[in-house]
């Protein structure tokens, strides 16, 4: 099992950029002999088959990529003539890549028949007679039980055409995206468990489907599967008529603030005047061992709800005091009650279920336990109002309410497959909208809706982006556009690549967006500047992924650099992301320095103001005067 060379290069980076046409084929040429050597060694060890994963086959490819594929598989086939090569694609349709791919000199192809059921016929029609087809029919990216009747319809067609010699049956992709086994899930009720299949169950499904094709599975087994699948679709647990009615009756006005950003800002400033270079944080403060231990004790029943709540209150009190002492302008309550920014909300929403051991790899050695959205989503009760209100009661400074956005909740969960993702996003958005409204009614005048997963939800094909961005933006707006003009909506995204989606980001119409920026030294702001992004921005000035404490000078330099490309009065001062994983010993001096940098810039305010119309111009000639007054970061 090897990652194919073309995907390796296309998904890889060279000097921090994607590998473009002049570099691609020369690099491939150097890479191929290494693959050739691996193949020969595998052959020497007695391997019959080698699978090459080329996930880029379901993406937009340039001609040089296709040429690379031809070179690669021509070369590999000749290097190890006795090895059978299986070329695997997944996560989508091949579309225009299908014809060039099917010509490649490999022994077998694997296709994702879950994400691309419509292409199975084309494969069956065009597959050369000496080749095999592996039909990925069991969903490797989700946790629902396979619908045997539906799968068998597709498989029977393939079986008739290919026979048992040339047809392989498989999961749609690697099983690393799903939890290992349902066996350990004692907390899930029997009905729900009936609807699910994790990795172990999925492997069984693959085997059962293969046997069923040969008529070796008793029809009762197929029927009981059909029943389980039908029961899920009909279950009153997944259908909530009120939710459906509400989602169907959303009016265009529900997606809009009642006035422009400029007008809102005036009113917001009147309600809560903040200094220039306003300082804030992204939401969480350090989740110390004590916080995590106390939550675990509460979960185990060793602490009463009352004791636990007192503990959380104590933490909120301390962190409000700390933020006042540091003289931050817009405070937060610290998120001590939250284990995870999605799980915390999911646990309070209807339509969500949680596993006990359903861990899946997120990246590297990090694992997450995604919630399962099985039914219509609604919010029976306020989820964050008490804690936020409590925090606000402790201070005269404004406290920012803190919510996770609908797209992120969707993206970081297993999602029902019986309705479009956009429908589920809309339902979650309505639940968040209720929370936003309740926060506002409780006197909270700043509300942040985090959408760190908005970008990662982008479809693999560019032509599909527009559709996704449309409903993703709509979901955010539905969640947020319920507030008065003088309530300020913030959002946060923990990445920095916005070039591709800057228009959609502007469409969110959040009053303030905070983003990760410190590591890229503010370079990413060029996309905001080139587009003339209209609303306020907080480019992160402190890389919270590192324990390093930034000093005042470097924070000032970053902010000045930001002010070269953005109007200074649009800029907020904040860290890159939440402080959950940092220690207080780093957080306190870093925030101290951040506030000191903002203060110092305020003093220089008049001078900085003069550059507010200064726009970023690539390769602009240096303005001597500007240089003297505002040394740039490079100096
Ligand atoms: N508000 C969240 C926090 O501060 C945001 C986390 C994130 O962006 N991933 O922890
Ligand atoms: Zn973040």
Image (cartoon, rainbow, N blue to C red):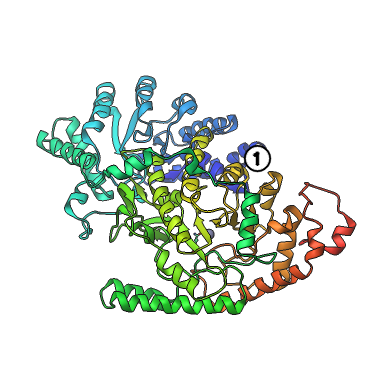
Q: Residue 616 in the image: x percent, y percent?
A: 76, 49
Residue under the point 56% across and 30% down:
67
Nearest the viewer among 476 and 499 is 476
Quarter of the image holding residue 539?
bottom right
Q: Residue 604 in the image: x percent, y percent?
A: 79, 68
Nearest the viewer among 132 and 111 is 111
Residue under the point 46% across and 40% down:
55
Residue under the point 58% across and 67% down:
330
In what element is the residue under mark 1?
helix
Q: Residue 368 in the image: x percent, y percent?
A: 39, 59
Q: Quadrant of the C terminus?
A: bottom right
Q: Quadrant of the N terminus?
A: top left
Q: Residue 6 in the image: x percent, y percent?
A: 53, 39
Judged left or right of residue 178, residue 275 is right
Residue under the point 23% across and 39% down:
233
Q: Is residue 16 at all visible to an observer of this figure? A: no
Question: Cβ(mark 1) to ligand 2 < 8 Å?
Answer: no
Q: Is residue 240 at all visible to an observer of this figure? A: yes
Nearest the viewer among 395 and 1 is 395
Q: Which residue is mark 1?
A: 23
Quarter of the image holding residue 112?
top left
Nearest the viewer among 556 and 23 is 556
């Amino acid at each position: 099992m090897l990652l194919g060379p073309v995907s390796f290069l296309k998904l890889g980076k060279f000097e921090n950029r994607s590998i473009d046409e002049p570099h691609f084929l020369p690099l491939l040429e150097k890479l191929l002999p290494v693959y050739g050597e691996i193949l020969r060694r595998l052959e020497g060890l007695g391997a019959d088959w080698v699978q090459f994963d080329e996930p880029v086959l379901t993406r937009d490819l340039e001609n040089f990529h296709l040429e690379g594929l031809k070179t690669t598989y021509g070369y590999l086939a000749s290097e190890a003539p006795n090895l059978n090569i299986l070329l695997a694609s997944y996560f989508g349709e091949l579309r225009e890549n299908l014809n060039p791919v099917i010509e490649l000199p490999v022994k077998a192809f694997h296709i994702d028949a879950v994400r691309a059921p419509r292409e199975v016929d084309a494969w069956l029609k065009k597959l050369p007679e000496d080749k095999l087809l592996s039909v990925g029919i069991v969903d490797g990216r989700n946790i629902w039980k396979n619908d045997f009747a539906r799968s068998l319809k597709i498989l029977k067609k393939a079986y008739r055409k290919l026979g048992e010699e040339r047809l392989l049956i498989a999961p749609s992709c690697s099983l690393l995206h799903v939890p290992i086994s349902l066996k350990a899930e004692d907390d899930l009720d029997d009905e729900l468990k009936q609807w699910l299949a994790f990795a172990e169950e999925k492997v069984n499904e693959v085997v059962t489907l293969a046997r069923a094709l040969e008529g070796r599975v008793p029809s009762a087994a197929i029927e009981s599967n059909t029943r389980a699948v039908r029961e899920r679709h009909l279950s009153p647990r997944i259908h909530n008529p009120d939710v459906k009615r509400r989602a169907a009756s959303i009016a265009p006005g529900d997606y809009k603030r009642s006035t422009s950003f400029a007008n809102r800002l005036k009113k917001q400033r009147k309600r809560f005047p903040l200094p220039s270079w306003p300082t804030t944080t992204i939401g969480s403060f350090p989740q110390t061992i004590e916080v995590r231990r106390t939550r675990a004790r509460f979960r185990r029943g060793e602490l009463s709800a009352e004791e636990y709540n007192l503990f959380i209150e104590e933490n909120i009190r301390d962190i409000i005091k700390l933020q006042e002492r540091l003289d931050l302008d817009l405070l937060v309550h610290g998120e001590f009650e939250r284990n995870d920014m999605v799980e915390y909300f999911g646990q309070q929403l209807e339509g969500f279920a949680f596993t006990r051991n359903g861990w899946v790899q997120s990246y590297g050695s990090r694992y997450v336990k995604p919630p399962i959205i099985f039914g219509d989503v609604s919010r029976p009760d306020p989820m964050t109002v008490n804690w936020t209100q409590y925090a606000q009661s402790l201070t005269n400074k404004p406290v920012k309410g803190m919510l996770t956005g609908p797209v992120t909740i969707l993206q970081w969960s297993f999602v029902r497959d019986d309705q479009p993702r956009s429908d589920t996003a809309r339902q979650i958005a309505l639940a968040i909208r209720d929370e936003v409204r309740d926060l506002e009614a409780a006197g909270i005048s700043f509300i942040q809706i985090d959408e760190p997963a908005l970008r990662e939800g982008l479809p693999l094909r560019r032509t599909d982006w527009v559709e996704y961005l449309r409903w993703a933006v709509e979901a955010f707006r539905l969640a947020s556009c319920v507030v008065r003009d003088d309530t300020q909506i913030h959002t946060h995204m923990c990445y920095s690549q916005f070039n591709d989606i800057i228009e959609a980001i502007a469409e969110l119409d959040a009053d303030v967006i905070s983003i990760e920026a410190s590591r890229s030294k503010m370079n990413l702001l060029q996309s905001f500047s080139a587009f003339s992004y209209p609303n306020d921005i907080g480019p992160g000035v402190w890389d919270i992924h590192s324990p390093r404490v930034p000093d005042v000078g470097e924070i000032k330099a970053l902010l000045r650099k930001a002010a070269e490309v953005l109007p200074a009065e649009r800029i907020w001062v904040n860290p890159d992301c939440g402080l959950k994983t940092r220690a207080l010993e780093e957080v306190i001096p870093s925030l101290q320095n951040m506030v000191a940098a903002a203060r110092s810039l305020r003093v220089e305010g008049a001078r900085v103001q003069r550059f507010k119309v200064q726009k970023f111009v690539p390769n602009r000639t240096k303005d001597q005067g500007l240089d003297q007054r505002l040394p740039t970061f490079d100096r």
